[in-house]
């Protein structure tokens, strides 16, 4: 019997408002490989429409701290510009990798650096908004945030963009379908790249 194909860890980051979630959703439809998403844990409260166990595992700060001290997280941090903790559970990643899946993490820059320390072969992709003006337009379009929130998110976005060089691939989300194809092609090009 041949051994199970090696799984892949795919890390996708980009500023809030860069259209990351829509792009990742489209990537799953294009299905360049056996993709599965890792559901993160967070201490932030759910937004309207978000579901526990689907969008995130919404847990209390106490439970987060307990799981952290028990070493359940592959990486976790307080995301820049947020008072909340976010983390990738090992239980979301290890079994899927062993089963040969391509595990997609949508995490921030700090988390990515920690993942790279443990999985140097992780495929890291940074999603850029078309432009800062485009980012501002998308953030305003959500109409869920105050001026102060928008200003804070734009500042966080500037900091994140400055860390884009840590990523192996850069994708500009100027047009969703084009960007999703580019993302899919990047992953397909990895197929033969395993050692
Ligand atoms: P939101 O609260 O808008 O869903 O996410 C805010 C930020 O948290 C995003 O930049 C997202 O990439 C990041 N994030 C989500 N889950 C994780 C995680 O498990 N670990 C880390 N480090 N960042 C995360």
Image (cartoon, rainbow, N blue to C red):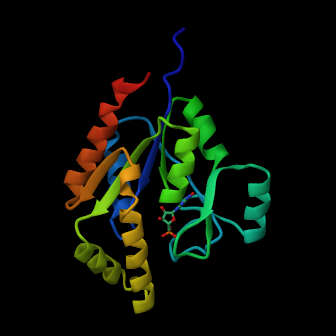
Tell me residue 123's x, y (percent). Answer: 42, 40
Q: For the point 54% across and 15% down, which residue is it? A: 3
Do we see residue 139 in this rendering?
Answer: yes
Do we see residue 146 in this rendering?
Answer: no
Tell me residue 97's x, y (percent). Answer: 55, 34
Q: Nearer the viewer, residue 157 or 138?
A: 157
Q: Where's the C terminus, which quadrant? A: top left
Up the image or down, 167 lies above or below 21; here it is above
The number of callouts visible is 0
Q: For the point 30% across and 42% down, which residue is it? A: 184
Q: Where's the N terminus, which quadrant? A: top right
Query: Which residue is outermost to the bottom?
Result: 147
Tell me residue 135's x, y (percent). Answer: 29, 73
Q: Please state if 36 lies on the left or on the right of 89 as rendered.
A: left
Up the image or down, 100 lies above or below 86; here it is above
Q: Nearer the viewer, residue 49 or 130?
A: 130
Q: For the point 51% across and 29% down, which residue is it? A: 100
Q: Please state if 127 lies on the left or on the right of 92 as rendered.
A: left
Name the quadrant containing residue 31: top left
Query: Which residue is outermost to the top?
Result: 1
Q: For the point 47% across and 39% down, which residue is it? A: 122
């Amino acid at each position: 019997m041949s051994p199970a194909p090696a799984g892949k860890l795919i890390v996708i980051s980009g500023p809030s408002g860069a259209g990351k979630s829509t792009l990742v959703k489209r990537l799953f439809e294009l299905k360049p490989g056996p993709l599965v998403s890792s559901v993160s844990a967070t201490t932030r409260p759910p937004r309207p429409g978000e579901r526990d166990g689907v969008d995130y595992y919404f847990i209390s700060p106490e439970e987060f701290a307990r799981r952290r001290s028990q070493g359940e997280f592959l990486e976790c941090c307080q995301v820049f510009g947020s008072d909340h903790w976010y983390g990738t559970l090992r239980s979301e990643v290890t079994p899927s990798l062993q089963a040969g899946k391509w595990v997609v993490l949508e995490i921030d820059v700090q988390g990515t650096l920690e993942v790279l320390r443990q999985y140097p072969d992780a495929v890291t992709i940074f999603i850029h908004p078309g432009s800062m003006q485009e980012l501002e337009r998308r953030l305003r379009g959500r109409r869920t945030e105050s001026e102060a929130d928008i200003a804070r998110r734009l500042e966080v976005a500037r900091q994140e963009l400055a860390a884009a060089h840590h990523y192996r691939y850069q994708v500009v989300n100027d047009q969703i379908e084009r960007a999703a194809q580019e993302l899919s092609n990047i992953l397909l090009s990895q197929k033969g790249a395993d050692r």
